[in-house]
Image (spheres, coloured by chain):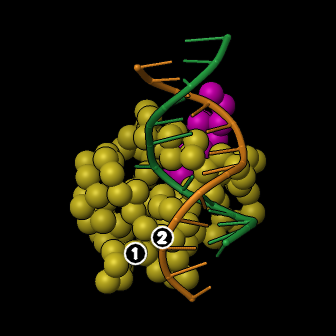
Chain colours: A yellow, B green, C orange
Amino acid sequence: MKFFEEVYEVVKRIPKGKVATYGQIAAMTGYPRRARMVGWALHANPYQGIVPCHRVVNRKGELSGGFAFGGPEVQKMLLEKEGIIFNEDGIINLEKYLWKPDKA
DNA sequence: GAAATGACTTCAT
DNA sequence: TATGAAGCCATTT
């Protein structure tokens, strides 16, 4: 599925210390209504280790929650190592860490 | 082939 | 402003 490849490319372009939302990635790929598929693509994540799926969160800046590449705790830890700080709710400050794509 | 599920988003109450 | 329900699209059973 070309869409998946698009998603992987976008996610790989997320700079260290930044995060992006599914909807935003979906919009970047050209399919603003495919937020769920973005999550699905990352779940399939054939490029695990290459695609920083841990930098992808929902629109609230919250972690994926359920099963991930190694667990939500691991995802949180990795993001903290990236320089991202979580608030009391374990949510990321999108105002500070939301990735702003150059223009595509 | 059809129905149900799912790492989400958005409108409506 | 916060909580609830519906919508979307691809994958899976």
**Amino acid residing under circle 2:** Gly
- The answer to whether one can see residue A10 in this image is no
Residue A9 on the magenta segment: yes
Q: Horizontally, is A63 left or right of A25 in the view?
A: left
Assign the magenta stretch its main secondary structure.
Answer: helix
Provide residue A20's location: percent of width, then percent of height: 54, 63
**Residue at label 1?**
A91
Q: Which mark is residue A49?
A: none
**Residue at label 2?**
A61
| Image position of A31 with respect to A103: above or below | above
Tell me what residue is drawn at x 44 percent, y 35 percent. Answer: A44
User: In which chain is the residue bearing label 2?
Assistant: A
The front one of A45 and A82 is: A45
Badge 1 marks a residue whose secondary structure is: loop
Q: Which residues are magenta?
A: A1-12
Provide residue B7's location: percent of width, then percent of height: 46, 49
Are dots 1 and 2 in contact, CB under 8 Å? yes
How many other residues sit within 10 Å of disc 2, few (<14), some (14-19) or many (≥20)? many
Pointer 1 or 2: first along the chain: 2
**Amino acid residing under circle 1:** Ile
Provide residue A12's location: percent of width, then percent of height: 52, 50
Residue A99 on the magenta segment: no
**Res. A83 image quadrant:** bottom left
